[in-house]
């Protein structure tokens, strides 16, 4: 009698898909470096290849129906697309200046920016424990920037890279808030619209090399649009509804941790111990915000009893 095949619970499939997507996102820096083009041109071709793949996926899933395209949703999607393109361009430009590791670590303060923007724009109240976690997260940001590590890192290029990263984080926070305001529009369609906005917005600003784009560059550009963009988005959006908040909050940090490892293994770039401590503080603070951890758990437990 043959053994019955082992089936993996569907929720575990979702978790594995999410992990795979985080690992793909961690390779972004490789595609950017190896493509060897300026940030705007790289983002344009990312949008091009991702839009083709996402359009095919949305067609396959039957998402192009009138009920998914309310006027409000379209306006918010286009606005989010403008911010997403700004995020991508600044993020890519920052990687080209300060490297994969520092850019990725610093960018991950964006959940705290979302919280603060929500308080300013929508008068959302921030609980005292979350405000404390946000403060810890920005303390981690100071350490992660590595400004104390030496005069070399205090160069104009380094500071410009940090400013670009924080600009991208603010733009992505705006994308998050605009997406929250949307109703009944599949996230895959939102991502497609973001890419289409990028194509329209950037087409007049791309800069091609004198000898044209080489075959290997086309391969990296296509890979950028298909793997850590279209496929990663499909996996993420398919997994999120099936995963608990705790798992999402924890597994999200596979991305920056792996990006740091990739940067070291592929390009020999390593971060200092102080910057690693900054990453750890950002991770702890983000988990504290997303999971609503109390600073005095024994008091919280007693109140529950």
Image (cartoon, rainbow, N blue to C red):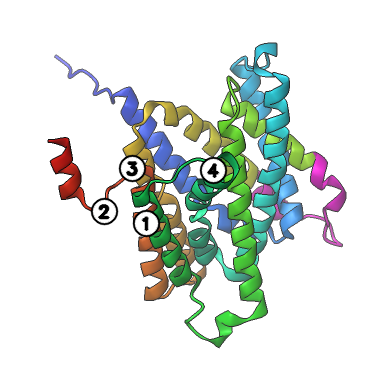
**For mark 2, what is the residue?**
295
Is residue 35 placed above or below 155 in the rendered structure?
above
Question: Is any part of residue 205 visible from this angle?
Answer: yes
Magenta part of the chain: 200-223
Which residue is at the front of the view, 30 or 88? 88
Which is closer to the viewer, label 3 or label 2?
2
| First in sequence: mark 3 vs mark 4 | 4
> Are dots 4 and 2 in contact, CB under 8 Å?
no
Is residue 252 placed above or below 90 in the rendered structure?
above
**For mark 4, what is the residue?**
118
Determine crowd level at label 2: few under 14, some 14-19, many 20+ residues with C-alpha closer than 10 A. some
Identify the element where label 2 is drawn: loop
How far apart are the alpha carbons under marks 4 and 2?
22 Å
Image quadrant occupied by the C terminus = top left
> Are dots 2 and 1 in contact, CB under 8 Å?
yes
- Find out whether residue 212 is within the magenta segment: yes
Q: Residue 175 in the image: x percent, y percent?
A: 61, 41
**For mark 3, what is the residue?**
291
Q: In percent of the image, x 61 and y 24: which residue is there?
A: 57
| Main SS, magenta residues | helix
18 relative to 155 in the view: left or right:
left
Question: Is any part of residue 53 visible from this angle?
Answer: no
111 relative to 224 in the view: left or right:
left
- Find out whether residue 301 is within the magenta segment: no
Which is closer to the viewer, label 3 or label 4?
4
How far apart are the alpha carbons under marks 3 and 2?
12 Å
Identify the element where label 1 is drawn: helix
């Amino acid at each position: 009698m043959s053994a019955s095949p082992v089936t993996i619970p569907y929720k575990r499939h979702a978790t594995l898909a999410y992990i795979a997507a985080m690992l793909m996102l961690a390779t972004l820096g490789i595609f950017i470096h190896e493509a060897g083009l300026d940030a705007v041109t790289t983002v344009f071709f990312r949008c091009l290849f991702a839009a083709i793949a996402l359009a095919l996926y949305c067609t396959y899933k039957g998402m192009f129906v009138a009920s998914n395209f309310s006027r409000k949703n379209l306006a918010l999607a286009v606005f989010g697309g403008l911010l997403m393109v700004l995020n991508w361009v600044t993020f890519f430009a920052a990687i080209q200046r300060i490297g994969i590791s520092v850019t990725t670590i610093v960018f991950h303060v964006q959940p705290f920016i979302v919280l603060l923007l929500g308080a300013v724009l929508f008068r959302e109240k921030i609980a005292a424990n979350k405000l404390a976690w946000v403060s810890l997260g920005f303390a981690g940001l100071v350490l992660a920037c590595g400004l104390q590590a030496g005069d070399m890192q205090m160069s104009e290029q380094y500071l410009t890279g940090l400013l670009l990263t924080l600009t991208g984080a603010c733009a992505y926070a705006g994308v998050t808030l605009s997406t929250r305001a949307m109703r009944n529009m599949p996230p895959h369609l939102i991502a497609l619209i973001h890419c289409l906005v990028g194509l329209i917005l950037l087409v007049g600003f791309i800069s091609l090399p004198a000898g044209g784009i080489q075959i290997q560059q086309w391969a990296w550009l296509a890979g950028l649009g298909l793997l850590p963009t279209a496929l990663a988005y499909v996996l993420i959006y398919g997994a999120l509804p099936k995963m608990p908040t705790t798992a999402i909050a924890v597994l999200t940090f596979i991305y920056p941790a792996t990006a740091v490892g990739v940067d070291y293994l592929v390009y020999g770039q390593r971060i200092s111990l102080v910057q690693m401590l900054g990453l750890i503080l950002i991770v702890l603070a983000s988990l504290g915000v997303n999971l609503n951890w109390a600073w005095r758990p024994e008091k919280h437990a007693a109140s529950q009893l």
